[in-house]
């Protein structure tokens, strides 16, 4: 595991120094800072709208960062031929891939944490309140978002083992859109009694084949008084989402390792 952690630490340092990531981060932070001025509503409506806007900006920025962090990890190492130097040492390919992924997730978590801090500060200053009850949605949602984006990063890491970065970017984006907007519909169709048998079977296959990112999204329940999206205990919902993400990430990384082990460099 020392090799994995060493590669991960190097990856975090490289991510922090990459200009494109810093530009994306700065643009996201700028939007988060000006978000309080984007609505002129009643105090209650203003609070809910501000949460929605801030979480929306945070989600889009984090998704772009997650894909950008991982889409070039393996291709850049091959192009610069640094991978040969690393693999010539007592480092297995699976350790290299896991180290790269772990480093990208740590860097992503740091960036999401920084943006979350800005969101909380902007919200507190604009609303003139530092109540934990009001700020809790802006803490819980980004926390779950880290697992959500780690899952997206795993998707991008898998694609990076067999497609070019440009194709990877678009494929990962499609998976993100599909898993966020379309997969919940397939989940309902696949439920018993919601569709014909043929459609239900196809819906179930599509539902399990593509990550359902909505399983890790508590924004709707956090931003509104009625938590219609969260059934039962919120803690149980979050725990189930985390388990779902960890299991799916593990499967994606195993597939990525199997492909990477057989790839000619």
Image (cartoon, rainbow, N blue to C red):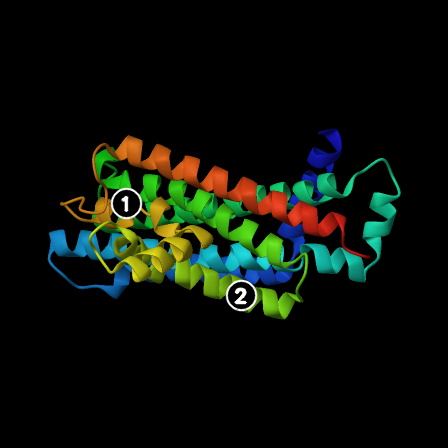
User: Does residue 190 appear left or right of residue 255 in this picture?
Assistant: left
> Is 76 located above or below residue 261 in the figure?
below
Q: Is residue 33 visible?
A: no
Quadrant showing the N terminus: top right
CA neighbours of label 2 inside 10 A, class few (<14), some (14 to 19), many (20+)? some
**Where 51 sits versus 166, above or below?**
above
Residue 238's x, y, as percent?
33, 36
Give the camera-side residue of 10 and 230.
230
Q: Is residue 45 left or right of residue 188?
A: left
Q: Secondary structure at mark 2?
A: helix
- Name the residue furthest front: 197
Give the number of callouts.
2
- Tell me the number on the disc at residue 13: none
Of circles 1 and 2, the one toward us is 2
Residue identified by numbered label 1: 124
Tell me the quadrant of the picture where the C terminus can be found: bottom right
Rendered image quadrant of residue 166: bottom right
Q: Which residue: 34% across, 40% down?
A: 139
Helix, strand or loop at label 1? It is: helix
Where does the image place residue 53, in percent across and percent down from the top left?
29, 59
- In the image, is residue 55 above or below residue 236? below
Q: Is residue 188 visible?
A: yes
Lateral position of residue 80 relative to residue 174, left or right: right
Q: Residues within 10 Å of mark 1 (few under 14, many from 20)?
A: some
**Residue corresponding to mark 2:** 171
Q: Return the residue nearer the eye: 243 or 141.
A: 243
Q: CA distance from mark 1 to mark 2?
A: 38 Å
- For image coordinates 39% across by 42% down, the residue present is 144
């Amino acid at each position: 595991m020392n090799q994995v952690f060493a590669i991960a630490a190097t990856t975090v340092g490289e991510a922090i120094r990459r200009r494109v990531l810093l530009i994306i981060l700065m643009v996201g932070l700028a939007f988060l800072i000006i978000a309080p001025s984007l609505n002129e509503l009643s105090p209650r409506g203003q609070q809910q709208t501000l949460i929605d806007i801030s979480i929306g900006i945070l989600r889009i920025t984090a998704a772009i960062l997650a894909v950008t962090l991982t889409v070039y990890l393996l291709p850049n190492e091959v192009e610069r031929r640094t991978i040969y130097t690393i693999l010539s040492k007592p480092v297995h390919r699976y350790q290299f891939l896991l180290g790269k992924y772990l480093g990208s997730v740590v860097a992503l978590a740091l960036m999401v944490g920084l943006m979350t801090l800005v969101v909380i500060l902007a919200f507190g200053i604009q609303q003139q309140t530092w109540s934990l009850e009001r700020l809790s949605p802006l803490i819980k949602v980004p926390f779950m978002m880290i697992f959500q984006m780690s899952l997206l990063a795993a998707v991008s890491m898998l694609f990076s083992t067999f497609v070019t970065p440009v194709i990877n970017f678009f494929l990962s984006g499609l998976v993100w859109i599909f898993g966020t907007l379309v997969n919940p519909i397939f989940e309902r169709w696949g439920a018993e009694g919601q569709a014909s048998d043929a459609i239900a079977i196809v819906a179930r296959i599509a539902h399990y084949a593509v990550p359902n990112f909505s399983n890790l999204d508590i924004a709707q329940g956090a931003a509104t008084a009625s938590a219609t999206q969260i059934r039962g205990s919120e803690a149980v919902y979050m725990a189930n989402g985390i388990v779902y993400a960890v299991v799916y990430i593990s499967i994606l990384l195993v597939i990525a390792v199997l492909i990477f082990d057989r790839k000619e460099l």
